[in-house]
């Protein structure tokens, strides 16, 4: 690609709620632009963009896919993004590198949760956008109803650029409101149209909406507004100029018609993208962080400026190696050269620059400002890194990823799987920054955390397919804690005589609660040499070791204060080990006299659901021993805030999906510990003892 073609690049993301037909519309774009030789269908598994086995099995987009199409002397780089809540983080990641977005709305479902979430991101990031009402050929669809739904659901001022001719199975074409002309769709999946008359029953509606369009366009500039208010006609060129100015400023959001699976509307969408969306050179400067000073710097898009590129995605492939995908914002990069990783401050030798075409790649000689391309087998570079100029290190101001809310303990099925598991997870974690893998210090389990149940199921499937590692997932043990509410004073004595040197240690300790969160406190109150100074640390060590093991249910003991105030020793038989045992015995005996209790982790939970479901969700929270803290209006419906025990939330991802038919989302993070209700304590103790018995077997 030549350097002077940056102005002809258009980078777009196809976004929206899952099942709105994003991939089918994207396939129609590729076919209409002759990037593919047939109109590929998602449902029969032949999609060029949904090429991962996990996507084909589930008939859904799981990871952003990349392709491009040449249209009217422009190159449109297309990113087909996920719309499921489990994978929408990849969509947000992709929105960092596009210059325009197509928000797809299902004509039968209207605005849904992810539609609203993505729309919020588009507005926050000031990304020029167009809305496409898709699937207008389906039953029970009404363009005008869904148009009103978009206005209210997104709380946005939107303007139709087209209205359909016919509806549902009788969808025949559309009226172009700019030109006030009718067009009929070809019935052969070609995407072609022919001129047709505007039906008589649409004439009045079309003229009314065209007047609204012209009024909305006029507001994009003072000059057009003055001309409009003077009663003068706006020319087609002036209308087009007003639309472009409004789209790029964000003040104008148009609405188009489509039925992606039939290739209705794809060519008109590409016409809009090429004519009205900005090129990379027309976008505002981006923000970067100076690695030395921490100051925010602005980088203007430029073909001839210094190189600045951002790595926003990594794909792990066990055969082809790692693919590093990045967007060039300034400057250019040539194949078979060296690139400087400004974040890690290392140089990387690169070979071919790859233009992505679904799962295939095509080598190119140069990547210019605006290009979204990939490099293979880089050693040091990972997602979030920046390519730039040595000595002027700048880091891209990237997004924060969503917090994982669903966790499972993972168990390798064989010794071979255990040996390969760490390496496989390292690759997958590099590919997916929303995954978290850690070893729990208390339960000693390996915990895999993700955005939801489907997210983790897909991860496990990828582990097996890509790396041959099979693992089982099970609910992790809850990290309960033990503590006390009462006080006591007890003796801990250890005396043993087996011939030869014996063992002797005598301790008296006071045990009492410490403040919640205060941890363990050991106080030396020995006077008069009742216990020699050199043995006192051993008493503390014995108590600490017993606290790690727990006493009533095998969970760590916290928030306890112990005072050592008396004891005895033997000149010959006393030792560190003897005092450790004595301290442990005394603490174990006294702990059960101090009204021991169990503590459980309490989570802050925020659930976003449609308004008509708030009552059911609040009732469900109460049934989970939760405390509803409040409710407020939010993007996607109502946001319910609650405090809920972790033990009641372990399968909430699946249960919320079931309760809301996939229309709910939630976040969850640890807040504090609280006492377990007494009627549940014995169940927890019994389960703990059962687990210990299984381990011994």
Image (cartoon, rainbow, N blue to C red):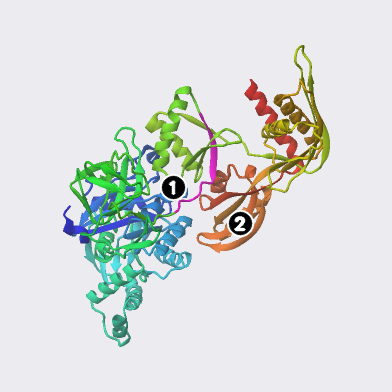
Start and end of the magenta stretch?
A: 400-411
Residue 509 image point, x, y percent: 80, 36
Residue designated by label 2: 641
Viewer-closest of 59 and 410:
410
**Residue 377 visible (yes or no):** yes
**Residue 73 visible (yes or no):** no
Graded by Cα atoms within 10 Å as few (under 14), some (14 to 19) or many (20 or more), the crowding at tag 2 reads many
Residue 236 image point, x, y percent: 23, 75
Q: Secondary structure at mark 2?
A: strand
Residue 401 lies in the magenta stretch: yes
Name the quarter where the C terminus is drawn: top right
Viewer-closest of 327 and 389:
389
Q: Secondary structure at mark 1?
A: loop
Contact, mark 1 vs mark 2 (Cβ under 8 Å): no
Residue plotted at (45% across, 30% down): 421
Residue 508 image point, x, y percent: 81, 33
Graded by Cα atoms within 10 Å as few (under 14), some (14 to 19) or many (20 or more), the crowding at tag 1 reads many
């Amino acid at each position: 690609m030549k350097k002077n073609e940056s102005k002809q690049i258009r980078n777009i993301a196809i976004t929206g709620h899952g099942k709105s037909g994003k991939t089918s519309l994207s396939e129609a774009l590729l076919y209409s632009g002759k990037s593919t030789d047939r109109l590929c269908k998602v449902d029969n598994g032949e999609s060029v963009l949904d090429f991962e086995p996990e996507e084909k099995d589930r008939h859904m987009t799981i990871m952003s896919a990349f392709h491009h199409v040449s249209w009217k002397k422009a190159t449109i780089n297309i990113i087909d993004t996920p719309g499921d809540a489990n994978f929408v983080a990849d969509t947000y990641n992709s929105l960092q590198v596009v210059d325009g977005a197509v928000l797809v709305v299902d004509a039968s479902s209207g605005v849904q949760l992810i539609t609203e979430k993505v729309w919020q991101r588009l507005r926050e990031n000031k990304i020029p956008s167009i809305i496409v009402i898709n699937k207008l050929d389906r039953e029970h669809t009404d363009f005008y109803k869904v148009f009103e739904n978009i206005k209210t659901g997104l709380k946005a001022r939107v303007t139709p650029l087209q209205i359909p001719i016919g509806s549902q199975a009788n969808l025949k074409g559309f009226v172009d409101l700019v030109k006030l002309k009718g067009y009929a769709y070809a019935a052969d999946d070609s995407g072609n149209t022919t001129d047709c008359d505007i039906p008589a029953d649409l004439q009045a509606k079309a003229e009314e909406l065209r007047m609204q369009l012209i009024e909305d366009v006029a507001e994009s500039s003072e000059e057009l507004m003055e001309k409009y208010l003077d009663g003068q006609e706006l020319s087609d060129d002036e209308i087009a100029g007003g639309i472009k100015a409004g789209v790029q400023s964000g003040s104008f959001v148009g609405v188009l018609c489509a039925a992606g699976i039939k290739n209705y509307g794809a060519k008109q969408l590409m016409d809009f993208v090429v004519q009205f969306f900005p090129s990379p050179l027309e976008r505002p400067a981006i923000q970067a962080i100076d690695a030395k000073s921490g100051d925010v710097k602005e980088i203007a898009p430029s073909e001839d400026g210094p190189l600045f590129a951002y790595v926003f995605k990594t794909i792990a492939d066990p055969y082809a190696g790692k693919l590093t995908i990045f967007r060039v914002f300034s400057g250019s990069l040539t194949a078979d050269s060296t690139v400087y990783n400004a974040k890690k401050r290392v140089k990387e030798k690169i070979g071919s620059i790859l233009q992505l075409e679904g799962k295939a790649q095509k080598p190119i000689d140069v990547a210019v400002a605006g290009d979204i391309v990939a490099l293979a087998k880089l050693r040091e570079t990972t997602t979030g890194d920046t390519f730039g100029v040595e000595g002027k290190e700048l880091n891209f101001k990237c997004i924060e990823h969503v917090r994982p809310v669903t966790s499972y303990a993972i168990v390798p099925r064989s010794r071979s799987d255990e040996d390969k598991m760490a390496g496989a997870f390292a690759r997958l974690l590099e590919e997916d920054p929303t995954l978290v893998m850690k070893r729990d210090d208390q339960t000693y389990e390996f915990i895999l955390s993700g955005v939801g149940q489907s997210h983790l199921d897909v991860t496990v499937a990828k582990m097996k397919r890509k790396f041959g590692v099979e693992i089982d997932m099970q609910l992790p043990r809850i990290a309960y804690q033990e503590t006390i509410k009462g006080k006591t004073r007890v003796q801990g004595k250890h005396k043993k005589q087996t011939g030869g040197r014996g063992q002797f240690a005598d301790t008296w300790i006071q045990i009492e609660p410490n403040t919640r969160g205060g941890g363990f406190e050991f106080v030396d109150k020995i006077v008069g040499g009742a216990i020699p100074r050199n043995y006192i640390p051993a008493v503390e060590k014995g108590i600490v070791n017993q606290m790690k093991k727990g006493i009533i249910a095998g969970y760590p003991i916290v928030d306890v204060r112990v005072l050592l105030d008396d004891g005895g020793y033997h000149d010959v038989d006393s030792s560190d080990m003897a005092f450790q045992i004595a301290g442990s015995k005394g603490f174990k005996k006294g702990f059960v006299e101090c009204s021991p209790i169990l503590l459980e982790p309490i989570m802050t939970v925020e659930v976003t659901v449609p308004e008509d479901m708030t009552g059911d969700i609040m009732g469900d929270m109460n049934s989970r021993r939760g405390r509803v803290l409040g409710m407020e209006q939010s993007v996607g419906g109502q946001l319910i805030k609650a405090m809920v025990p972790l033990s009641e939330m372990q399968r909430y991802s699946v249960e919320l999906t079931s309760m809301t038919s996939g229309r709910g989302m939630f976040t969850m993070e640890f807040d504090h510990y609280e006492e377990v209700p007494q009627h549940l304590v014995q169940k927890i103790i019994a389960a703990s003892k059962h687990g210990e018995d299984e381990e011994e077997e």
